């Protein structure tokens, strides 16, 4: 596995020894692979930066990584990534434990490519429970293993 340079230079997640994605890190540098920082998720959505490396220049159509359930619900937790970062992100999803905002280990992931998305922001009453990306023009859905 070759990590994109900008990703390889990020702080390592202590438990897995893998680079910690931008979206899992809090501004004080804390964070772990299991949880998403809501602030960073919103920053990615609004500033159009990559969920993994935190830099701009996302491709078009945008790739969104999600679980089967998220594809079915058309609601994703993880902001879009660069293609190279997405390829590297499979090292996280293959760990066999809860990662990237999931509460259980997810064996099956999909990559959806979309021309754009709406962001469903938590309204303060618990709905939705987390910022949710809703693609509105899905170009393709691909299974990743
Ligand atoms: Zn990236």
Image (cartoon, rainbow, N blue to C red):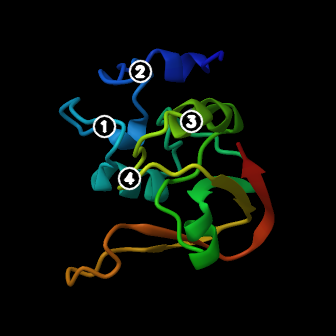
Q: Residue beneath label 3, please?
A: 94
Locate residue 26, reporting x and y percent: 24, 39
The residue mark sitting in front, 1 or 3, is: 3
Q: CA distance from mark 3 to mark 2?
A: 19 Å
Q: Which mark is residue 10?
A: 2
The answer to whether 55 appears left or right of 13 in the picture is right
Question: Mark 1 vs mark 3: which is more N-terminal?
Answer: 1
Do callouts 1 and 2 mark residues in contact (Cβ within 8 Å)?
A: yes
The answer to whether any part of residue 1 appears in the image is yes
**Disc 4: CA contacts within 10 A as few (<14), some (14-19) or many (>=20):** some
The answer to whether any part of residue 60 appears in the image is no
Q: Residue beneath label 4, please?
A: 101
Question: Mark 4 vs mark 3: which is more N-terminal?
Answer: 3
The residue mark sitting in front, 4 or 3, is: 3
Do callouts 4 and 3 mark residues in contact (Cβ within 8 Å)?
A: no
Q: CA distance from mark 1 to mark 2?
A: 10 Å
Q: Secondary structure at mark 1?
A: loop
Q: CA distance from mark 1 to mark 4?
A: 12 Å
Q: Residue beneath label 1, please?
A: 25
Locate residue 18, reporting x and y percent: 44, 21
Reply above or below: 64 against 121. above
Question: Mark 3 vs mark 2: which is more N-terminal?
Answer: 2
Q: Secondary structure at mark 4?
A: loop
Q: CA distance from mark 4 to mark 2?
A: 19 Å
- Pick the quarter of the image with the N terminus: top right
- Pick the quarter of the image with the C terminus: top right
Locate residue 99, reporting x and y percent: 42, 44
Reply above or below: 60 against 18. below
Do callouts 4 and 2 mark residues in contact (Cβ within 8 Å)?
A: no
Question: Mark 1 vs mark 4: which is more N-terminal?
Answer: 1
- Ligand 1 shows up in the quarter that is top right
Q: Secondary structure at mark 3?
A: loop
């Amino acid at each position: 596995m070759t990590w994109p340079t900008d990703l390889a230079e990020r702080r390592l997640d202590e438990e897995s020894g893998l680079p910690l994605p931008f979206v899992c890190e809090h501004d004080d540098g804390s964070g772990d692979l299991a949880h998403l920082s809501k602030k960073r998720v919103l920053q990615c959505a609004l500033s159009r930066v990559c969920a993994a490396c935190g830099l701009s220049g996302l491709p078009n159509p945008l790739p969104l990584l999600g679980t089967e359930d998220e594809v079915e619900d058309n609601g994703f937790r993880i902001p879009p990534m660069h293609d190279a970062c997405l390829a590297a992100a499979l090292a996280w999803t293959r760990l066999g434990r809860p990662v990237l905002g999931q509460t259980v280990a997810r064996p099956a992931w999909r990559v959806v490519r979309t021309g754009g998305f709406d962001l469903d922001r938590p309204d303060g009453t618990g709905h939705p429970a987390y910022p949710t990306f809703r693609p509105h023009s899905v170009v393709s859905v691909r299974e990743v293993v």
